Image (tube, rainbow, N blue to C red):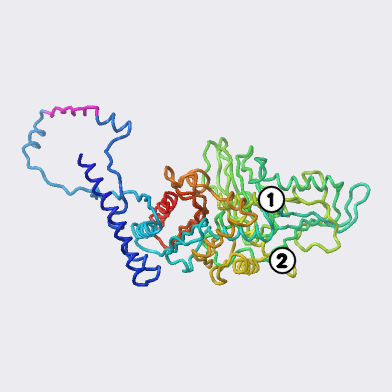
Amino acid sequence: MRPLLRLRSLITAHTAARRTAARHVARCAALGLTASALLAPSPLAAVAPLAMPQTAGTGKGASKAATKPKAKPKAKPAAKTKAATKAATKPATRKRSSAPTRRTTKAVPVLRHTTPRGEIALAADLHALLTARTTSGAWGVLVSSLSHGDTLFAFRGDAPMLPASTLKLYTTALAFDRLGPGHQLSTAILRDGSVDADGTLRGSLYLQGGGDPSLSTRYAGGAGPDAPMAALARLVADAGITRIRGDVVGDASAFDSKRIPDGWLARYLNDSYAARVSALSLNENLLNVAIAPGKGQSGVVTLQPATVAYKVVNNTRTIAGSRASKLVVSRTSDGTIVARGTIGSRSQPKVYQVVVDDPALMTTGAFRKALERQGITVDGELRMGNTPPSSERVATYRSPPLSTLAGDMNRESVNHIAELLFRSAGRPGAPDGVGSAERANMALRQFLTQKVGARADAVSAADGSGLSTLDRITARSLVQLLGYANRAQWGTEFHQSLPVAGKSDMLRRRMVATPAAGNLHAKTGTTSEVIALGGYVTARNGELLAFSFLYNGTDRWRARETIDAMGATLADWSR
């Protein structure tokens, strides 16, 4: 009965705390204080979280172990020798143990969501959750009812915050608004000469990038990294071209030449999530270097996707056995790829990933390699340049609809897709048709002020993914964006692009077995100094709520626990 009495005591204290919070708000209203008085320390913090009493060892294995009698250790007979007798009579010398002393730490109860009723109780509970766990850092939080049009909770709602990947929500909305969810990005193949009857092109062939991220194994249906360029080469063959007298030219002029956005830290640049940005991209601008055992002394080094853009130096050796030893892949200053080390004759191939510094060059080199594999002879060189205005179109390769690309971007948080969509959204209206992060940021601010109703200084985007340390948003602007997206013509596609708590992608393991599971759908944001979540949740009474939870600081795991508890609390709230 003691655990039950303890539980009743906690429930009584929880109810009393809510009543105290209600009286506090009433006093604030009577004194004419602002709504910020709701953010005073809440008495709920003294009793939150409310944890159910648990019985130790409730699992199947624990139950079995508890019922099984412990075997009595068998005594080892002492050796009856003179030395043993002497040792037994000698006083023992106390030795200092070299083993580390184990410190017992008090278990911290799980931060649980609450079930508030009414606006006052919700505000009190959310504030209590904000102060219950994190010991450092800063919060920016805002919750609004899209059904009733009122703000339910605000805490530093206008403070500029690092957004991490919640910035992708702005990129999605801007791209949908300026281009449309059904828009397809394209890669064009053009020629600047005539084609003879025998299929000889008396000129050069141009590969003109349009910021399409779908030239990737992600969209190849399992066909492998060479599939996108093989598809483009078939389009050239289908146009009747069998030989190219001129050059194969890559054109990435649809975007500006800045491949690394402002604010990307140097430590990011060798990781796949920080691939370079280009209007002419392939395989998310990552190159795989595969090393396999050879039949002779050397190993076999291949590039995936295959490209003629890079020289490869193979300093690997095949040895007996099944192990690979000291395999290293590096690049020289001129872009040469060097592989060295040993690999066993019975070893599986080892694959090393390289972030490509010049995506357009790698892509054009892969295009030329695919043309050769298609049986098309190329007499000229591989080079980069702009397509002449008088060139004639040979074929066009189109991406999936923007709604599909945005869904993959948001559900899996793909930075590469975000950067290409952001710059593509900045191209309409540009005098020269060139997309850049700067132009996209200007377009975003115009969109926010003219359509969303947010302040012009509420958002500053140095990139489209949220990886930049220069990005800033406010919790209020994000909720305003969510409200506009909900009523926009493309609102359905926007909602569908988001992962669902406890069910899919980035939220699959979060808020499981809570009222938010299968209900809350939102975009995550995570870096070394940010934990964020922004999206929608349906409350217990059927109201659709938009929320923005932004945390900047180093106490990220506790902040994530707090965010999940607040999300579930919103799902279990009613007026």
Element at label 2: loop
The residue at the point 63 percent across, 39 percent down is: 294
Whether 69 is among the magenta residues is yes
174 relative to 133 in the view: left or right:
right
* Foreground label between 1 and 2: 1
Pointers 1 and 2 in contact (C-beta within 8 Å) = no
Badge 1 is on which residue? 401
Q: Which mark is residue 461?
A: none
The residue at the point 92 percent across, 46 percent down is: 198
Label 1, label 2: how far apart the Cα atoms are? 21 Å
Q: Residues within 10 Å of mark 2 (few under 14, many from 20)?
A: many
From which residue to which does the magenta span run? 67-79
What is the quadrant of the C terminus in the image?
Answer: bottom left
Q: Residue furthest front?
A: 30
**Type of residue at label 2?**
Val
Residue 380 in the image, given as x and y percentages of width and height: 82, 56
Element at label 1: loop
Residue 311 in the image, given as x and y percentages of width and height: 68, 54
> Could you tell which of marks 1 and 2 lies nearer the N-terminus?
1
